[in-house]
Image: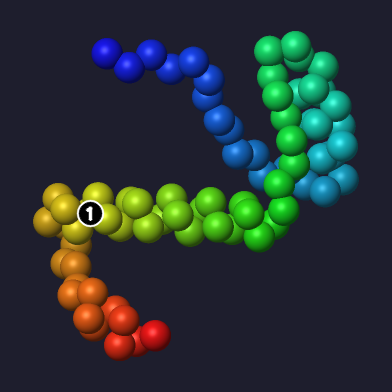
């Protein structure tokens, strides 16, 4: 059995409220909060989408394509 020792959460916060939210989160001794760049946030979102798409291909809900076809597109 896997025991979760920490949960990661990604939040979208309006710019004018970001400082307040960060101060609030950091006020809890059980929370570690740090900001990430928009590029990193986009990368995380794209990776999440890719994993979901892979799950759909493996379950047969979506059709995959050959790696050769993918590489030819590049």
What residue is disc 1 on? 56
Specify whether 74 is left or right of 11.
left
At which x and y percent is residue 16?
87, 45
Specify whether 48 is left or right of 39.
left
Residues packed near mark 1 inside 10 Å, few (<14), some (14 to 19) or many (20 plus): some
Quarter placement of the N terminus: top left
- The residue located at (80%, 31%) in the rendering is 21
At which x and y percent is residue 37?
72, 53
At which x and y percent is residue 33?
72, 29
Q: Against 4, is 49 above or below?
A: below
Looking at the rendering, which quadrant does residue 13 occupy? top right
**Helix, strand or loop for disc 1:** helix
Q: Against 32, is 66 above or below?
A: below
Q: Against 52, is 32 above or below?
A: above
Quarter placement of the C terminus: bottom left
Front-lying residue, 54 or 15: 54
Farthest residue, direction left: 60
């Amino acid at each position: 059995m896997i025991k979760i020792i920490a949960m990661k959460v990604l939040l979208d916060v309006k710019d004018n409220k970001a400082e307040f939210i960060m101060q609030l989160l950091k006020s809890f001794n059980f929370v570690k909060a740090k900001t990430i760049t928009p590029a990193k946030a986009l990368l995380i979102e794209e990776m999440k989408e890719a994993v979901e798409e892979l799950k759909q291909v493996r379950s047969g809900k979506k059709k995959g394509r050959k790696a050769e076809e993918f590489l030819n597109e590049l």
